Image (cartoon, rainbow, N blue to C red):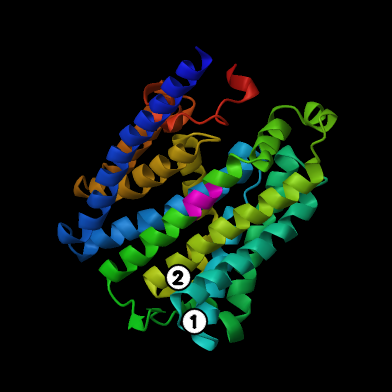
Amino acid sequence: MSDLASRHAVRGTRYSRRLLAVPLILLVALLAAVPVVTNDYIQYVINLILVYVLVTVGFNLVLGYLGQLAFCNTAFYGVGAYAAGLVATHLTHSFVLVVLGSALAGTLAGLLVSLPALRLSGYYLAIVTLAFGELLRWAYIHADTVTQGSTGLLVPTPELFGMAVDSQTRLYFAFIVTVAVMLWLVRNILRSRFGRALVAIRNNRLAAMSVGVAPAQATILAFALSGCVVGVAGGLFAMLTSRIAPENFGLGEMLIEYSMVMIGGLGSLWGSVLGAVLLTGAPEFLRNFAGYEEIIFSLLLIVVLRVSPRGLGGVLSARLPFCKERLFVSSGDR
């Protein structure tokens, strides 16, 4: 009888995997067909959405999963962007090496920010991380021999497999693969023991320590991972715009990225993706309503947060079984 039950369980698992494969195949086909039905401007907006997907996911690692009020995302974003620009200018035009350079720079910045995070939390950590981002922006302006100051740093055209990635379509395919790989890595990391440790620290630090979780080690790794993901996003942004300047990484940028995380949902990977899509794409479509786009955009934010305090990720987790995330629910939601 037990053998029969186990066979039925295996068949059910295979059947569910086949059901999940259908929307996945459709999604891949849809993404591959995007350049066919879009012009250069819409393709640019889609590429920018892919950049912000990584920014939001990386920011959510610290803000949502670890539960630390740290606004270091623009710092990681800027470091990754300038690292990509400098690598492309002085070392190589290889797309892969430029992305690796931005990932390394972001990781190092994350390790640096994790040091005050070991002793500070809450509003104190928020102030320190905000100051860190502004300090870096000051450095971008005054280290003009390296960063070209307020004029901005021009980023050479990257190359991939010997071809220049010099069009929005080529950038799109390079970006979509990069983003897919990063999301896959982050998803697997969050489902590992390390991901469960982050949520345990967020929910109850003392309880996590009582079962053998090391908060200091987990915090350092979380900030390093966040810096890596957001640093890669900065590198993609640098290659997308071909010019980066200090004003790209100010407080206004930080507020936009914070809104993406809140709208998508704290501690939700799918929500991070949706938040980036909504808050990057909506302003572009609202430009047709001259003079009203700010009002419409603000009302949209209020409505989403009022209807679903857990963000769009909470809606997906409740309605779609394959989007349910084990690590989404926090102690405050129980």
Task: Name the foreground residue: 328 vs 142.
Answer: 328
Q: Residue at x 37, y 45 (%)?
A: 279
Compared to 149, does 266 lie above or below? above
- At label 2, counting other C-alpha atoms closer than 10 Å, the crowd grade (few under 14, some 14-19, many 20 or more) is many
Q: Amino acid at mark 2?
A: Ala
81 sits left or right of 70 in the view: left
- Cα separation between marks 1 and 2: 10 Å
231 sits left or right of 15 in the view: right
Query: Tag 1, which secondary structure?
Result: helix
* Residue 297 in which image quadrant: top left
- Which residue is disc 2 drawn over? 238
Task: Please tell me whether the stretch drawn in magenta is mainly helix, strand or loop.
Answer: helix
- Which residue is disc 1 drawn over? 88
- At label 1, counting other C-alpha atoms closer than 10 Å, the crowd grade (few under 14, some 14-19, many 20 or more) is many
Q: Amino acid at mark 1?
A: Ala
Can residue 184 be found in the magenta stretch?
yes
User: x%, y% of residue 241?
Assistant: 38, 70
Tally of numbered discs: 2
User: x%, y% of residue 128?
Assistant: 72, 51
Q: Residue at x 52, y 63 (%)?
A: 232
* Front position among marks 1 and 2: 1
Query: Tag 2, which secondary structure?
Result: helix
Compared to 29, does 312 lie above or below? above
Residue 114 in view, yes or no: yes
Q: Which numbered circle lies on residue 174? A: none
User: x%, y% of residue 67?
Assistant: 66, 36
Compared to 44, does 180 lie above or below? above
Compared to 281, does 231 lie above or below? below
Can residue 178 be found in the magenta stretch?
no
Q: Are marks 1 and 2 in contact (CB under 8 Å)?
A: yes
Q: Write the start and end of the magenta stretch as one range.
A: 182-186
Q: Residue at x 54, y 80 (%)?
A: 87
